[in-house]
Image (cartoon, grey):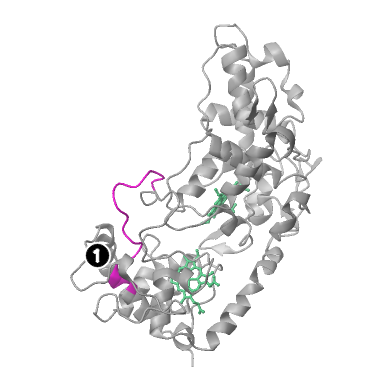
Amino acid sequence: MKFKALTAIAALVVAPGLALAQADDDNLVINGEIEAVTKTAAPAHMEDTGVDTIMSGWHFRSDETQALQMDDFDNPGMIFVDLGIEQWNKVEGEAGNSCASCHEGPESMEGVRAVYPKWNEDAGEVRTLAHQINACRTENMEAEPYKYTGGQMANMEALISSKSRGMPVNVAIDGPVAEVWERGKELYYTRTGQLELSCANCHEDNYGNMIRADHLSQGQINGFPTYRLKNAKLNTSHARFKGCVRDTRAETFTPGGPEFIALELYVASRGNGLSVEGPSVRN
Amino acid sequence: MKITLTTLAAALVATPLIAGEVAPASVTFGEYGEIEQSLTGQPGDPENGGLVMKNKSIGNCIACHQVSALSDQPFHGEIGPSLDGAGDRWEEADLRGIVANAKQMFPGTIMPAYYKTEGFTRPGNAYTGKAPEGDLDPLLTAQQIEDVVAFLVAQKEE
């Protein structure tokens, strides 16, 4: 081995710190009124990660893409919020109920997105927002559940998220959810697939860097569901997880399954303190 | 263009081990992770090595590395160091080791191992997200590794 190689490696050790410089300093204000927190101090549980500032994926997108999220008339995701309102009021299932029968207007959902996934005492399980939506459908409406990452689910999640926009993500990580959270953390750091890559390899060690034509963000989920210009539809977090795991040349996990529930809880908790942005716009 | 297409087609066909090639499981790494012995016994073709490195569905090295000699292809990544001058910094055996399995030289590196077929967590069937059918092929064939090594050896700045 030649001596110069060592200098090349030494230079690399400092690289992660430089990543910070590459998230821009723009401010996200939606409709001229909702001031979103898109950068803030990392939550205490991230102390050992070397990440001291958490950042929304919004900072890693181009000015044009960012602008689409700043006004509901420009945000293509808002079309799906309107579809969500129709679904909200629609009576379906044997019980003759709609969401509105139990919850009145969608405004009643204010603050809900910010604290999911969370513990459900009666069911004795960690529930994602999507699971809760389907639990309402099957138990309270006696209707068919939505497909976990399907369009109707994304619409309903977009509607519910939109009522919490600007509020800080605040998922609990201790008490009854602690075990699931630990499992999610383990998954986040597990290097999967033939490329042997973990979430952390890309979104903790390399955010701010380009990977081919993509500008890597921290992989936060405060903006979900996300309207992606690339596939021109609303995307759920588990569909995104599936895509990222597939890209490691791995056998993916099932959306809505125990692994992705745990991963969602853990990834959500890495965003504790960022504003809810869904439906956000990404490329 | 014709050359690129032929190369691509060749890469899509799972290649049985050719006589005289060293199989992934039989590769001998040296103390630092270098591989002295050629994997094929044949000289590498640097031009094809460059194609392997920039093609997204073959080596896709430029997803992570900037390489000036491959600048006809846009969008080089920033995850790993620039490979300009790699031939000044490393011996051929080192480069072979890095490309075959960089984790031998740089423990814990993000760089994938291109000549390895076992020891993965939840390996999939390429980018389908599904379970693999049968044994995995290495990411690159022995000859592609030698081609890439020949390309890298030729990257000189001094």
Q: Give yes or no for residue B139 being in the magenta stretch.
A: yes
Chain to which the residue tagged by mark 1 belongs: B
Task: Name the quadrant containing residue A170.
Answer: top right
Q: Residue at x 26, y 82 (%)?
A: B43
Residue A141 versus residue A237 in the image, above or below: above
Q: Position of residue B29 (x, y in %)?
A: 39, 75
Q: Which residue is mark 1?
A: B6
Q: Residue at x 60, y 39 (%)?
A: A262
| A98 vs A18, nearest the viewer | A18
Residue B148 versus residue A184 in the image, above or below: below
User: Is residue A235 among what the camera can see?
Assistant: no
Q: What's the magenta region?
A: B128-145
Label 1 environment density (alpha carbons within 10 Å; few <14, some 14–19, many ≥20): few
Q: Give yes or no for residue A132 being in the magenta stretch.
A: no
User: Is residue A65 among what the camera can see?
Assistant: yes
Magenta span main SS: loop
| A92 vs B149, nearest the viewer | B149
Q: Residue at x 39, y 82 (%)?
A: B93
Task: Name the quadrant containing residue A164.
Answer: top right
Residue B120 versus residue A269 in the image, above or below: below
Q: Of the residues shown, which amino acid type is indicated by label 1?
A: Thr
Q: Position of residue A172 (x, y in %)?
A: 74, 37
